[in-house]
Image: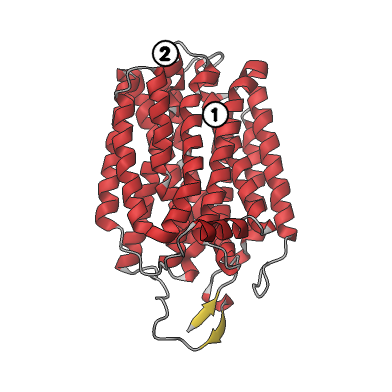
Amino acid sequence: MRIHHTEEQTGMSRHTVEAAPRPSAPPEGYLPGSRAYRRVVVALFAAGVATFALLYSTQAILPELSAQFGVSIGDSTLSVSLTTLGLGVALLVAGPASDVLGRTRLIHLSVTASAVVAAGCALAPGWSALLALRLLQGVVLAGLPAVATAYLREELHPSTHARAAGLYVGGTALGGMIGRLVTGAVGEAAGWRWALAAAAVLGLACAVAVRLLLPRSRGFVPAPAGARALLRMSLRAVSDPGLVTLYAIGGCSMGALVAVFNTVGFRLQGPPFGLGLGVASLVFLVYPLGTLSSTAFGRLADVRGRRAVLPLGCLLAVAGALLTLPSSLPVVVAGLALLTAGFFAVHGLASGWVPARAHAGGVSTGQAASLYLFTYYLGSSVFGSLAGPAWTAAAWPGVVALATVLLLATGVLAALLRRTPALPGVRAR
């Protein structure tokens, strides 16, 4: 049968039946417990690990890069900001391309090419070459995040969408942690080149896993090709106020997280902490909390609705940012843990909401997901770069102030989203 799903909730009890099925109707989607469902989830989890391990592979070794290349703290953050900038711009092409070419083809190309470019970063002859390769790294990484949530919506049963998106985002959180821990430890022991080489090996292993596990698309329907069709899709994707608000939520929340983690290594290596590069990178062990929170908040949203749950993630993140202010290592770590959990709760809900609302409104899910991620990584690039001047002007309180303003803006946007009407014919909480 043909089914309309709610924009915010996808349980079977919330479906409304419209008409009898047609023989050519697409499959309903893989159900939890099936072998194919497990393959999809594990493959996307591995792809998320690779993408974010490589995307932020230089973040834990920024002090090492600053010392080795003789660049300022602000300039060292360019090795992160240029990558996220390249990723954000490439998403504007990758999303529409996936609507024509298909999801799985782009996912395989992205994870494989990113491992190759990561190996090139480890061999970079100088600072300018490293920055150029990091920019290219962002471009080739764009294929996965551009299509991941759209792929999940098309291939999995509607009752699992929020939790599956949470698991994917959990993979990105774990990847971010592993990449930073590996590069931090190896960087302290053997230098930045070996640190980036280790990240490349991790990316290659994940690419092999994705190649072996990811099923071919069953629910993908190619969109019309051509510049005119692309323009129509783009205009529709920016004409819905709910989608635009979700895009802004992604940019502000991601900017806050990256601003904090771009500079926390400098804080922990300075007084009163005096930690080494490898030990300081252990703060990224808080990232598994992002995996847990994105999954847990996704399950809660399947029951309560995203409108009700999203503001809770914002409050958790603000509390975490403020808790990092005291000069006590356990308190700082606790604050980073809360910030991470709150951020991934927000991102997991918002990133899964975008394709759901886009689909309900007849908007290209790939295009909408790409625009969400464009603002997400634009926020990472712009506000992550501003963390350097904030640190120079007011040290850690300046960074926390920047992050708190961005998180409060996220909360205001979440409140506005609660008042944004659901799309016609779509029930919402």
Q: Nearer the viewer, mark 1 or mark 2?
A: 2
Q: Which residue is mark 2?
A: 69
354 sits to left or right of 412: left
Q: Who's the residue at 46% across and 22% down the image?
A: 62
In the rendering, which numbered label is found on residue 330? 1
Q: Earlier in the sequence, mark 1 or mark 2?
A: 2
Q: Who's the residue at 40% across and 48% down the image?
A: 143
Q: Amino acid at mark 2?
A: Phe
Residue 172 drawn above or below residue 405:
below
Q: Is residue 334 visible?
A: no
Q: Position of residue 88 (x, y in %)?
A: 51, 41
Q: Secondary structure at mark 1?
A: helix
Q: Position of residue 30 (x, y in %)?
A: 38, 70
* Quadrant of the rendered image containing residue 339: top right
- Cβ–Cβ under 8 Å for marks 1 and 2: no
388 sits to left or right of 224: right
What colouring method underlies this structural image? secondary structure
What crowding class fits label 1: few (fewer than 14 Cα within 10 Å), some (14-19), or many (20 or more)? few
* Quadrant of the rendered image containing residue 383: top right
Q: Can you name the residue that lies furthest to the bottom here?
A: 20
Q: Amino acid at mark 1?
A: Pro
Q: Can you name the residue that lies furthest to the top here?
A: 70
363 sits to left or right of 99: right
CA separation in Å, label 1 and label 2? 32 Å
